[in-house]
Image: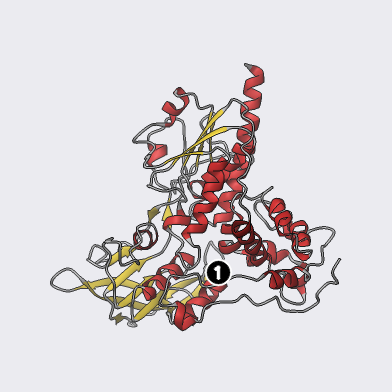
């Protein structure tokens, strides 16, 4: 075994130069080499109690896979990861490891934690580049399960069940599966070819993916049961954008972040050969402080915008975006207008955006979330000269499934109500997870819910079969 590397800092991740990458949609981080990965792996202390595993929503056996990386056994490392995760190349790129597995790392007490996410990404990429064998399709157990929604929760649930021998059909509303991985997260953070490879791997396991299927319209949940499906998993996400209900939000040039990113990512508006309609603004205000706001701002730069502003009503300390995304945004030239809140979108005589009126804020007492509540400063209004405004203040679950299915209940925010241990909804045989249950959250939490639901569905069907 290699001697532990006690270097206090993690092996740097190679990246494109900020002034080059802000003009292209190629991936920002170019990834570890085998030598870099093995060097970083030697920083792991292989702790007996494995605190990092408890920080992972899908409980990847982290020290075990890192030990294989340390020894140069990359395929063995991949096998370990995929015992728990269906989408390792995705998780290695977009998981907020700094608040999950890496936050529990013992090395982080006195120095930088081990780069767990970077190592997971390397292992997944190595497997994709070097492995030509398709996964073996498991033997059928004779049972059918339907999954509504082909995003992280649905794909994870489908993959987990397929490995158990279930015949799984995924019903996806868009023309391609992947959910937020395809329509929301930009190419420069998560290349779509990588997402497609992960999806193809699930198809090799026997998962049947049917696209352009708007469930609740094309077919109801009850009809799925009539067609022989023994259980249904609902992973429809939170694709209904929230707006601020301020004056001018209906003007030409105002987008929800969902629409803006979907046009760019899924509909390839950034490519000249695609005729997807999208405004290529010169001056952009993005309202919000989360990862989606950073994605929209950085995408606007790459479309050719000269000035891009993040307008956020709190300070940077309260921003929900990952530190890495904030750092990359600043490097690329995004302007942060913190402690400012928009109050009105200004238009010209043709109904097009020409400005965003904002008011300065100051932080008062903490609110229910524990963050200090922003309070407007009287008489501090000013106007940002912009020709596009992108609203990125969160999303709510689409009501289509619950509104067309008797017995499925939701809370006041429209999130499906489930048993947190089993993920079963208020309707027997119907399970749910991901953003449809929690509201907008992280990819890995959605995956964890999908995996948990798959185990419950398996138990439900086995018990039901014994009774019958």
Residue 182 appears left or right of 121: left
165 vs 128, nearest the viewer: 128
Which residue appears at 36% of the width and 61% of the height?
Answer: 268
SS at mark 1 in the image:
loop
Residue 275 can be seen in this image: yes
Q: Residues within 10 Å of mark 1 (few under 14, many from 20)?
A: some
Residue 114 appears left or right of 394: right
Q: Residue 349 in the image: x percent, y percent?
A: 13, 72
Residue behind mark 1: 322
350 vs 281, nearest the viewer: 281
153 vs 355, nearest the viewer: 153
Q: Quadrant of residue 205?
A: top right
Residue 285 appears left or right of 141: left
Q: Residue 183 in the image: x percent, y percent?
A: 41, 56
Q: Residue furthest top?
A: 468
Which residue appears at 24% of the width and 67% of the height?
Answer: 248
Residue 433 can be seen in this image: no
Q: How many marks?
A: 1
As drawn, 294 above or below 235: below
347 vs 168, nearest the viewer: 168
């Amino acid at each position: 075994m290699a001697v532990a590397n006690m270097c206090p800092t993690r092996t740097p991740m190679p990246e494109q130069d900020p002034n080059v990458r802000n003009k292209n949609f190629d991936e920002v981080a170019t990834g570890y080499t085998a030598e870099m990965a093995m060097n970083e792996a030697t920083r792991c202390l292989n702790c007996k109690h494995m605190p990092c595993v408890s920080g992972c929503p899908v409980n990847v056996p982290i020290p075990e896979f890192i030990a294989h990386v340390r020894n140069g056994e990359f395929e063995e490392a991949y096998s370990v990861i995929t015992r728990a995760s269906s989408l390792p190349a995705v998780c290695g790129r977009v998981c907020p490891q700094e608040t999950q597995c890496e936050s529990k790392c013992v090395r982080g007490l006195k120095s930088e934690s081990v780069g767990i996410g970077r190592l997971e990404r390397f292992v997944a990429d190595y497997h994709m580049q070097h492995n030509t064998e398709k996964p073996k399709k498991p033997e059928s157990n004779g049972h059918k399960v339907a999954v509504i929604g082909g995003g992280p929760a649905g794909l994870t649930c489908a993959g987990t069940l397929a490995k158990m021998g279930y015949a799984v059909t995924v019903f996806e509303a868009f023309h391609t599966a992947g959910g937020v991985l395809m329509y929301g997260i930009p190419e420069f953070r998560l290349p779509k070819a990588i997402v497609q490879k992960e999806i193809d791997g699930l198809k090799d396991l026997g998962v049947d993916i049917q696209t352009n299927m708007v469930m609740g319209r094309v077919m109801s949940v009850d009809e799925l049961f009539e067609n022989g499906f023994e259980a249904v998993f609902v992973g429809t996400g939170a694709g209904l954008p929230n707006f601020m209900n301020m004056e001018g939000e209906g003007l030409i040039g105002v987008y929800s972040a969902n629409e803006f990113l979907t046009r760019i990512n899924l509909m390839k508006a950034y490519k000249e050969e695609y005729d997807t309609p999208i405004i290529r603004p010169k001056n952009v205000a993005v309202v919000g402080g989360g990862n989606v706001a950073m994605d929209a701002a950085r995408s606007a730069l790459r479309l050719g915008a000269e000035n891009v502003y993040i307008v956020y009503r709190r300070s940077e300390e309260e921003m929900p975006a990952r530190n890495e995304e904030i750092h990359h945004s600043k490097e690329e030239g995004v302007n942060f207008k913190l402690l400012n809140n928009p109050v009105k979108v200004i238009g010209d005589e043709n109904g097009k955006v020409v400005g965003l009126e904002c008011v300065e804020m100051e932080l008062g007492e903490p609110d229910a979330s524990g963050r200090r509540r922003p309070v407007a400063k009287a008489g501090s209004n000013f106007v940002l000269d912009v020709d596009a405004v992108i609203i990125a203040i969160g999303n709510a679950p689409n009501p289509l499934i619950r509104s067309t299915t008797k017995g499925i209940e939701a809370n006041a925010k429209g999130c499906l109500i489930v048993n947190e241990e089993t993920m079963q909804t208020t309707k027997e045989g119907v399970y749910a997870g991901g953003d449809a249950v929690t509201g907008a959250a992280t990819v890995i939490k959605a995956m964890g819910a999908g995996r948990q639901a798959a185990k419950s569905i398996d138990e439900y069907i086995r018990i039901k079969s014994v009774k019958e």
